Image: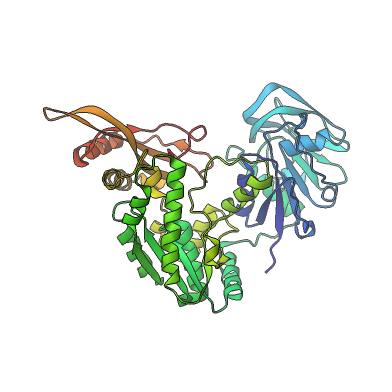
Amino acid sequence: MQHDKVLILDFGSQYTQLIARRVRELNIYSEIHPFNKIPSNIEEYKAVILSGSPFSVRGEEALHPDLSHIRGKKPMLAVCYGAQYLAHFSGGEVAPSNTREYGRANLSFIKNNEPFLSHIHTGSQVWMSHSDTIKELPTNGVLIASTHDVTNAAYRIDGEETYAIQFHPEVYHSTDGKQLLENFLVDIAGLHQDWTPDSFVEETVEAIQNKVGNDKVVLGLSGGVDSTVAAVLLNKAIGKNLYCIFVNNGLLRKNEFESVLNQYEGMGLNVKGVDASKRFLDALAGIKDPEKKRKAIGNAFIEVFDDEAHKLEDVKWLAQGTIYPDVIESVSATGGPSATIKSHHNVGGLPDFMKLKIVEPLRAIFKDEVRRVGATLGIDPELLGRHPFPGPGLGIRILGDITAEKVRILQEVDAIFINGLKEWGLYDKVWQAGAMLLPVNSVGVMGDERTYEKCVALRAVESTDGMTADWVNLPYEFLQKTSNDIINKVKGVNRVVYDISSKPPATIEWE
């Protein structure tokens, strides 16, 4: 089945992925491409959205693509920078704003009988995020909405299906943002809302069968949501021709290797568990630098996985749980406006000598969509609701060098924290939680004795996609009990702190 597609041109906004996800929540398929890499098959897209940007259209570095083959020929929605871009280069005027146009605002004027603003009323809250403002509309521009401080908050181009807004409909703070996108995509552009988890499963299973045929496929399972959903999808498509390998790198959570392995076998997957803890700890001996630790863990995984894959006969394909944000980031890093902060948590590509073809059943969907697909496949909600866990595991939660004793300490601490969140009914209110073992000893008193032991930091954040995150205000009573339990029950720890940093500027993991 051919789905209608929306093209989102990325000008570097931190919200671009959010636009794509909001579109998909309307059951419409969307794709993100860098502004300077417009797809050659433009005729396959039924509508185009221009994202925001950290750049100014007035600056020397203004991002200035040629949109002549799109504008006026396809329905187009320009958001923030996109709206200023259309004005600045098409007969209007953009100038620095006299008032601070950032944060919540309310629509004070809405032009009557505009399909774009159907079901949206005066007073509707919108989210502004720009330092420039549109002083004069472009040629043939028609004003359709204002706020108290921003006269030209929304406009359209007469004679075209081109609309522009200076606010962000994709963020939750814009209360009618989803309605606005639906007005544009469904009522104006005429797209069909048929991109659903059910249709994705059906089409992906068929695509895998056509691509792989009767060949054997090997997949490295991590215990996380992405690799699990990928495994169940592949299993549905090719059954026993899928060979899963679950590697214990010695940096998993307490008892995780055994419990996850049992869970996988209960799901009917053809899975082999490999305990390579010693091999990983040996490879990490004495390494303190976070990037070197990541590389050591990645290299050890490749070696173990390669050893196991070679024991299988006639395997032709390597399956990976790559999801759409990984694909977007790899494209942006080579040609788009986004920046790379650090090596990705996921293990990198396998070496050339493995000579396996790649199959990535989830590469078109976002994390929240992966969970919805998993629910459609009947995967246990508890497994789908698991917090994200980094590929290097506790290796990047132990600051400094890694030893078996430090792993033991952190596993015990982490188990008390995570189990406590579940017991208090807090686990599902948190996007990700974990403990960090700090390279710090502090003085304490236990009984009548002076101690000089480790300090651990607890971290719990709320987020939708991990790109931004706020620390969670956990109850003091819970933190107090958790701290007492950790200090009393975990030998080697005498101090517990709680991390109240948000991302940005901090990252979720400490390394």
Quadrant in the rendering for residue 416: top left
Q: Nearer the viewer, residue 346 or 349?
A: 349
Asked if 188 appears above or below 484 in the picture, the reply is below
The residue lying furthest to the bottom in this view is 214
Q: Nearer the viewer, residue 388 or 111?
A: 388
Quadrant in the rendering for residue 145: top right
Is 91 left or right of 315, judged from the image as shown? right
Task: Name which residue lies at 33% across and 59% down.
Answer: 257
Asked if 131 appears above or below 187 in the picture, the reply is above
- The percent coordinates of residue 306 (x first, y second) are 45, 64
Q: Nearer the viewer, residue 356 or 393?
A: 356
Asked if 69 appears above or below 509 in the picture, the reply is below
The residue lying furthest to the left in this view is 448
The residue lying furthest to the top in this view is 98
Asked if 427 appears above or below 497 in the picture, the reply is below
Quadrant in the rendering for residue 138: top right
Task: Name which residue lies at 75% across and 57% down.
Answer: 45
Task: Name which residue lies at 88% across and 36% down.
Answer: 139
- The percent coordinates of residue 234 (x first, y second) are 51, 69
